[in-house]
Image (cartoon, rainbow, N blue to C red):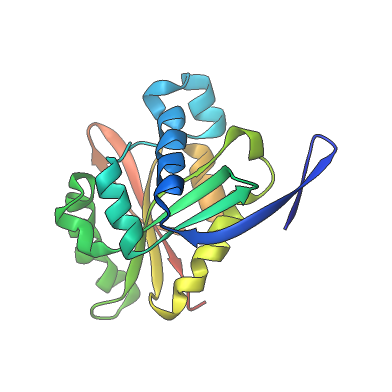
Amino acid sequence: IILYLGGMSEKLRLEFSNDPAIVDQILALQLVNLRQNISSAEAKDQGFVYVHHKKEALQSVCDTEPAVVGLVDTELAGYAICMHKKFKDQVPELQKLLTLIDSILPQYVQMNNPSYLICGQVCVNKNFRGLGLMSMLYEKMKDLSSKYQFCVTEISSQNTRSLHVHNQVGFKIIHTYTKHDEEWNIVLWDWNH
């Protein structure tokens, strides 16, 4: 894929990776884009990430289901963390979310034990925003549709940019709830349609 940045063309590679050097780049990009590390204006305009993972935990997640990454040369342009639900008890932020998903998803999709992948987080490097990279990361993630029927994630209602882009990709809000005095949305992308 060719990206056009400031009059220059750059080659983007989309791939799955569990390379420890890539995991380090993901952690660095997370840290820069944490809600508490950016201005409220930037959070509203550009979106934000909510969780900074521990290296060992993220490496374990990526060893089970590699992250989708967009690379320009060796620079991380963006990532989407593919998280198997087996990490429910290992990633504290997932425990309540997965319990909630497991209680509402079967009713919503009208099937027992639907197979789903959690998008643990998606983020695009500031230098590569506005190019449709988030949609490209999710399209690459959809390569996993032979293993999973659905992709599920949660998004803060305050992250309006993320809600908008997820809607464009094909995610639908299936549940809204309050966590830590903030409204959150569980969104679902049906990979069968």
Q: Which of 46 and 9 is in front in this view?
A: 9
- Residue 176 vertical position relative to residue 149 in the rendered view, above or below: above
What is the quadrant of the N terminus in the image? bottom right
Is residue 30 rendered to the left or right of residue 58?
right
- Residue 105 vertical position relative to residue 176 in the rendered view, above or below: below
Residue 132: give x, y in percent of width and height. Answer: 66, 50
The single residue placed furthest to the left in the displayed view is 89
Q: Can residue 30 be seen in this view?
A: yes
Q: Nearer the viewer, residue 7 or 172?
A: 7
Residue at x 58% of width, y 52% of height = 70
Residue 72: give x, y in percent of width and height. Answer: 65, 47
- Residue 16 vertical position relative to residue 176 in the rendered view, above or below: below
Q: Which of 118 and 2 is in front in this view?
A: 2
Residue 152: give x, y in percent of width and height. Answer: 37, 60
- Residue 36 vertical position relative to residue 157 in the rendered view, above or below: above
Q: In which quarter of the image is residue 144?
A: bottom left
Residue at x 46% of width, y 75% of height = 145
Residue 84: give x, y in percent of width and height. Answer: 29, 63
Is residue 63 rendered to the left or right of residue 37?
left
Q: Nearer the viewer, residue 77 or 147?
A: 77
